[in-house]
Amino acid sequence: MIVVATEDFRLYHEAVSALRERSATFTTVEPDEELPARASVVVAAPSDDVDLPADASVTRVDVDPDDVRSGVDEALALLEGGGGRTIIGVDPGPQPGIAVLAGDTVVTVYQVPLGDAVETIREAIADATDPLVRVGDGDRLKGARIVNELEDVPVELVDETRTTPYLGDGARGMADVLAAVNIAGREGERVESRELDPTEGELQRIKTESRKRSAGDRTIDEPLARRVADGELTLDQAIAVHRDGRHRDE
């Protein structure tokens, strides 16, 4: 875990802001306070007097207050490189939850549109040695799209039963992220690709959802349902296309 330990007001606030933007796991202490047991990297100003453990289990990163983000990047790289194998957990869906773990430590989490998921994963593993991506099996079609676009990356398909906690109304996004963390921690079955052709049942579910989403106004047809299943259109886009009839001339 990263610990911010500095008396420099500007460094403190910029480091905390940068770590929050990266959804990194971190805490803060005063420089003269004892470090938490889980500390592995300390972010501090060169002038800060921080008492590090004698066993060298914690690495100090001296950060230039004029270039805090570079220091935060260095801290995250140290955390990832020194904490074990880089494992990415993915909870597939319209807005997949993505968790980056170094060993058992959560380094960064994301929630992005499905179309940005593979790029986000590739950026997370760009400098990693022997990375592994674990994809949940709950949303077959969206998971298949991610798996198939990661053809040159080791991927495991994971049973995501009971990986998504209930957090109450308004916390769905956080639940997806926590599910991704849980998926990253489960061993799965190595896969090279997944079948992307939607079943009749999956197409019917998309059509039914379109009816609900449009408040009973319309149900999209099968060609549009297939485009939604393939990730070419979102459900809302498909409803809009169906409403103005554009797809009939395509």
Image (cartoon, helix red, strand yellow):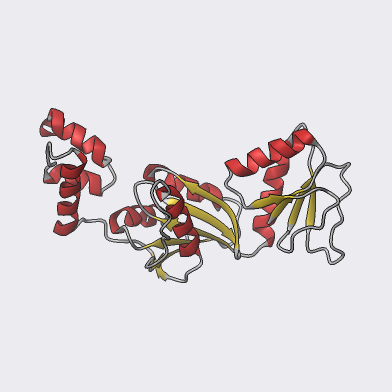
Give the image location of residue 239, x and y in percent.
19, 36
Residue at 58 percent of width and 44 percent of height: 22
Give the image location of residue 220, x and y in percent.
14, 41
Side (left or right) of 62 relative to 69: right
Residue at 57 percent of width and 59 percent of height: 101
| Residue 167 visible in the displayed image | yes
Side (left or right) of 48 relative to 200: right
Residue furthest front in the image: 168
Give the image location of residue 244, x and y in percent.
14, 28
Side (left or right) of 23 relative to 194: right
**Front one among 238 and 9:** 9
Q: Quadrant of the N terminus?
A: bottom right
Side (left or right) of 201 relative to 35: left
Q: Quadrant of residue 175?
A: bottom left
Q: Quadrant of residue 8?
A: top right
**Front one among 189 and 160:** 160
Residue at 18 percent of width and 32 percent of height: 241
Q: How many marks?
A: 0
| Residue 152 visible in the displayed image | no
Please tell me whether residue 27 is drawn above or below residue 137 in the rendered image. Answer: above
Please tell me whether residue 10 is drawn above or below residue 89 in the rendered image. Answer: above
Q: Quadrant of the C terminus?
A: top left
Please tell me whether residue 92 is drawn above or below residue 66 in the rendered image. Answer: below
